[in-house]
Image (cartoon, rainbow, N blue to C red):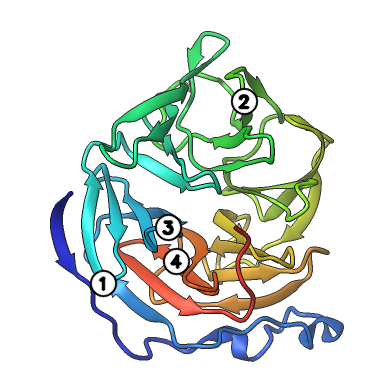
Amino acid sequence: MKSKVTLFLIGTLICISAIEPPATLAQSDAKHSIVPTGEIQLVQDGFAFTEGPAWEPKSKSLFFTDIPNTTIHQLHPDGTITAFTVESKHTNGLLIPADGRMLGCQMDGQVVEYDPRTADATVLASTYEGKRFNAPNDLTIDNEGGIYFTDPLFSAPTPLPQTVQAVYYIAPNGDVTRVTEGIAAPNGIGLSPDRKRLYVCPSRQSAMLVYDVTAPGKLSPAKTFCTVQQPDGKTDTGADGIALDIKGNVYITTHIGVQIFSPEGNQIGVVTFPQQPANVCFGGEEWKTMFVTARTGLYRVEMPIPGLH
């Protein structure tokens, strides 16, 4: 562990736009809107670009990444932040599933598992059909232990090694398959509570995608799950990271904040932050704390519904 930093919290930073349902919400959805139960708090600022928040319940810690600084940080229960590793090979998304493993997408071209004691990385997948991945971005895991991950173009070599941007599946035996067609910068990814739907959120289109999971690593053709709101003056901007709660609501980080959608694809809330969110996860004692990585900062806010874990 290295470079300890002291945690600090500040009071109210910004109005929470979800207090009044956004104008785009249908009247029938207004009564189902999701509103934070606490104030937005800045945990720490001054990073280069934060990403990949993941809650570890045994140590009651949050892990998150600072991509340009090749660092994975750990936020401890006492409020201090230490460096888990400073050699992350530009790790972006992190995942800590129920079995306690720490999985990561290294944008340098591979998906890895980190040793929780030494931070040594074991490569789980680095190539498909003999070529390196573009730049693995984010990941989720199914009940069988198989890993779905997105592989867009961000920070990838040019021309793209895989020629397409898609989603891949690492089976428990290590076999890798491409499970989608080309997508406009696939980014955030997550499974529904019943593991029957896979959400994939592209960064370069406003339509978010959902797939029926027909078998481990087998997906139906894509359908449009929802369309995210666009910021003023922009068109066809998409999403970054996503998270789900235990009711199956989907929390999507976009240019305007964390947009919340019901399982039916209806927008039921927006939470705005001082900086543009990049990724989101749930944690805390009751899994009701929403942690958001947003450019140079890490934020937290209490929510009414526990996150999926």
* Residue placed under numbered mark 3 in the picture: 58
Distance between the Cα atoms at labels 1 and 4?
Answer: 19 Å
User: Residue at left 83%, top 86%?
Assistant: 27
- Looking at the image, residue 294 sits to the left or right of residue 288; the answer is left
User: Element under label 3?
Assistant: loop
User: Residue at left 25%, top 37%?
Assistant: 118
Q: Quadrant of residue 102?
A: top left
Nearest the eye: 258 or 184:
258
User: Element under label 1?
Assistant: loop
Distance between the Cα atoms at labels 3 and 1?
Answer: 14 Å
Q: Between tags 3 and 4, which lies in front?
A: 3
* Residue placed under numbered mark 2 in the picture: 172
- Looking at the image, residue 48 sits to the left or right of residue 224; the answer is left
Can you give x and y, in whole percent of width and height, for residue 104 in the image? 43, 39
Q: Between tags 2 and 3, which lies in front?
A: 3
- Looking at the image, residue 120 sits to the left or right of residue 303; the answer is left
Amino acid identity at mark 3:
Lys
* Residue placed under numbered mark 1 in the picture: 78
Tag 2 near tag 3, CB within 8 Å: no
What number is the disc on residue 292? Answer: 4
